[in-house]
Image (spheres, rainbow, N blue to C red):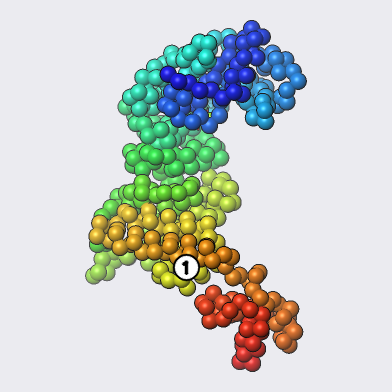
Amino acid sequence: MNMKISPAAERVIGVLRGAGYEAFCVGGCVRDMIMGREPNDFDITTSARPEQTKACFHGFHVIETGLKHGTVTVVIDGEPMEITTYRVDGEYLDNRRPSEVFFTSRLEDDLSRRDFTVNAMAYSRESGVVDVFGGREDIERKIIRAVGEPDRRFCEDGLRILRALRFASVLDFSIDRETAESIHRNRALLRNISAERILVEFVKLVCGKGAARVMGEFVDVVCEIIPEFEPSVGFDQRNPYHIYDVYMHSLRALEAAQGDKYVKLAVLFHDIGKPGSFSEDERGGHFYGHHALSAELTERALRRLKSDGKTLHTVVKLVNAHDRGLPPTEKSVRRLICSFGEEDTRRLIQVRRADNSALVEWLVEPRLAELDEIERIVDKIHAEGELPSLKNLAVHGDDIIKLGVSPGKRIGEILNKLLDDVLDGRALNDKQTLLDRAKQYIEK
Ligand code: ATP
Ligand code: MG
């Protein structure tokens, strides 16, 4: 097996071993190397106590990240490397965090505190892979399995329930039966976990390759975190364009979604307000105004999960706009880019692609063709350079004041009319042209 560890990790291990200690890469990076994936970072585990580690890296920039938990960060060529002493966790009092940790001299003890078999392996060039819980076999079989007794491990730290789903999604693995049953049984333990820790795992889950499959299998866990989804599960849309219930439609759309976390989250949430906006007449089910309720529920959920502002703002905006009228014309696309910005316009197109991929089959192709056309228009507008905006309009507020309008709301109204004229191609963005038009507006 070709295990390629980073030069910085190699160096850390070399220094610690040179001082007579054991040292290994551990956790996610070993799993990723075995799978042929690029590791995010290389965590190091060592028999050296934190003070001993610090002494080994005398002369380096050392950050005492979590001395109490045995972690020291050493900066090697600008790269921060986390080095943690072999440890076992003390008693867990609140399904969250151990009350204390104990250092140990045995690597096996350190591996046994880790969450899943695929995350509980260590590696060094000298010793090869250390795999006491069958992690390699589980990678082979594509299985997430708790280390030890699942009930006990989830009771120690409820976040592991969501981490299991996260790894199943990101690695596209399934969850071992016993572990899965324990997850269903213990899902309420997630209530003891802080919103911040939940959101980190949840976003990774939603962005993973297997997200739709995993969230379909563990609806109960999803609703534990986001109860706003409950009414969507099994909600029959009674509408000829839809073949799935609301929750399944959202998952099918998520499966089709291409793009970043904002796109994926918006796709997942886009119809969450549908059950609450349902009405029915002789033509079938309707969801008038569901985008607004969806946006409201999305905002509520993301706020509760303590989302950062940019994520909250972007996702809510995309949800709110997911079904607004957008004819494939230059005029309407120009307007959208002006109010949304190009980046979010492209995201919105991705959201709509995903949404439209999960409709009744005969609708999919024409809808996607229209979105391709809209995207072509965005590219064209992009190639033409900066779009007109109030900022780069050839006339400004003081020009209007010079025409005799007194400062106030009226100035902004006139400028916006001029901007509309430019955007819609009725006028060139040229000073004299716009001043002439402004005079006409003033006279009116
Ligand atoms: P990623 O590639 O996303 O960084 P990772 O496997 O490195 O995934 P981290 O959250 O960075 O995951 O954690 C590093 C390692 O620490 C894990 O591989 C696992 O061995 C251990 N670990 C992390 N969180 C827990 C936990 N809540 N319970 C038990 N072990 C954990
Ligand atoms: Mg990691």
Task: Write the residue at 67% across / 16% down.
Answer: 53
Front in this rendered view, residue 340 or 243: 340
Amino acid at circle 1: Val
Q: Give the position of the N terminus as an image quadrant.
A: top left
The single residue placed furthest to the bottom in the displayed view is: 443
Residue 2 relative to residue 91: left or right:
left
- Residue 262 placement (x, y as % from top left): 49, 50
Residue placed under numbered mark 1 in the picture? 333
* Depicted 22 relative to depicted 215: above or below: above
Task: Write the residue at 56% across / 47% down.
Answer: 307
The single residue placed furthest to the front in the displayed view is: 383
Q: Looking at the rendering, which quadrant does residue 216 occupy?
A: top left
Q: Looking at the rendering, which quadrant does residue 367 occupy?
A: bottom left
Q: Give the position of the C terminus as an image quadrant.
A: bottom right
Is residue 325 visible to the viewer in this orientation of the structure? no
Label 1: few (<14), some or many (≥20) within 10 Å?
some
* Depicted 428 relative to depicted 278: above or below: below
- Residue 196 placement (x, y as % from top left): 56, 40
Task: Write the residue at 43% across / 23% down.
Answer: 34
Q: Looking at the rendering, which quadrant does residue 242 occupy?
A: bottom left
Residue 83 relative to residue 162: left or right:
right
Local secondary structure at mark 1: helix
Task: Write the residue at 64% across / 7% down.
Answer: 20
Q: Is mark 1 within 8 Å of ligand 1?
A: no
Front in this rendered view, residue 25 or 155: 25
- Residue 303 placement (x, y as % from top left): 54, 50
Is residue 81 visible to the viewer in this orientation of the structure? yes
